[in-house]
């Protein structure tokens, strides 16, 4: 299940992003950010977006030793997640999809540099605000330290799959 979630977030993030930055130190990737700027074109055809979603569903259905009912439950969880998230984050808004810093490199400023680059990219394009979905048990304190405001929590069965007791939430950074 963790592998499917990882695949879902990375594949979907790549397909929908028009801002992709990787921070390397001595040839090792230490941080990455995949995001969407609503005022800039996505450098991929819509077919690729659809194709990436179909690949995610395909990956789910080829998992062995998982009952069909469980696979359907996961698909329904994805739909519930998206529906609840949409109450806080409007589809098509500028948004950070995937933002990861290697735990051994956190606190060294790499993530802040990537985040600042995306905020600047959005500001220069006339974007008013950037939306961020995260997990309360994840990077909430980081986002608050860099000036993001909590918009609210939302129920997400997907967050339960990845972080037991995890609470999905949305932040906003006003540019």
Image (cartoon, helix red, strand yellow):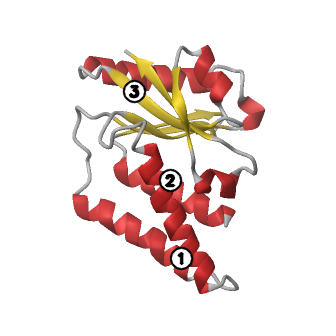
Q: Which residue is mark 1?
A: 72
Is 130 drawn above or below residue 174 in the view shown?
below
Lateral position of residue 162 relative to residue 78, left or right: right
Front one among 145 and 166: 166
Image quadrant for the N terminus? Answer: bottom right
For marks 3 and 2, give the CA distance: 19 Å
Q: Are marks 3 and 2 in contact (CB under 8 Å)?
A: no
Coordinates of residue 139 in the picture (x, y in percent)? 65, 31
Between the C-alphas of marks 3 and 1, the distance is: 32 Å
Vertical placement of residue 97 versus 125, above or below = below
Residue 41 picture location, percent across and down: 22, 41
CA gap between label 2 and label 1 equals 14 Å
**Which one is nearer the viewer's eye here, 100 or 23?**
100
Which secondary structure lies at badge 1? helix
Q: Residue 53, image x and y in percent?
A: 39, 65
The residue wearing badge 2 is 81
Residue in view at x 31 percent, y 33 percent: 37
Q: Residue at x 50, y 67 (%)?
A: 76
Dot 3 and dot 1 residues touching (CB under 8 Å): no
Q: Dot 2 lies on which element?
A: helix
**Mark 1 neighbour density, 10 Å: few (under 14) some (14–19) many (20 or more):** few
Dot in front, 3 or 1: 1
Rendered image quadrant of residue 119: top left
Q: Residue 173's image quarter?
A: top left
Q: Which is in the foreground here, disc 3 or disc 2?
A: 2
Circle 3 sits in a helix, a strand or a loop, which is it?
Answer: strand
At x 67% / y 23%, what residue is drawn? 141
Q: Position of residue 118 (x, y in %)?
A: 41, 26
Instruction: Report which residue position mark 3 lands on.
Output: 130
């Amino acid at each position: 299940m963790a592998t499917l979630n990882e695949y879902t977030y990375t594949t979907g993030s790549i397909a929908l992003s028009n801002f992709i930055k990787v921070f390397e130190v001595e040839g090792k990737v230490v941080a990455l950010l995949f995001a969407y700027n609503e005022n800039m074109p996505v450098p991929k055809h819509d077919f690729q977006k659809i194709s990436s979603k179909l690949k995610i569903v395909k990956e789910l259905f080829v998992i062995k030793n998982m009952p069909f009912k469980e696979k359907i439950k996961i698909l329904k969880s994805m739909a519930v997640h998206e529906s609840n998230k949409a109450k806080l984050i409007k589809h098509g808004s500028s948004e950070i999809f995937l933002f990861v810093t290697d735990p051994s490199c956190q606190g060294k400023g790499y993530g802040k540099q990537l985040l600042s680059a995306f905020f600047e990219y959005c500001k220069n394009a006339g974007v008013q605000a950037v939306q961020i979905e995260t997990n309360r048990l994840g990077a909430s304190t980081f986002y608050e330290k860099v000036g993001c405001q909590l918009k609210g929590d939302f129920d997400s069965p997907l967050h339960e799959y990845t972080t037991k007791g995890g609470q999905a939430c949305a932040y906003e950074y006003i540019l």
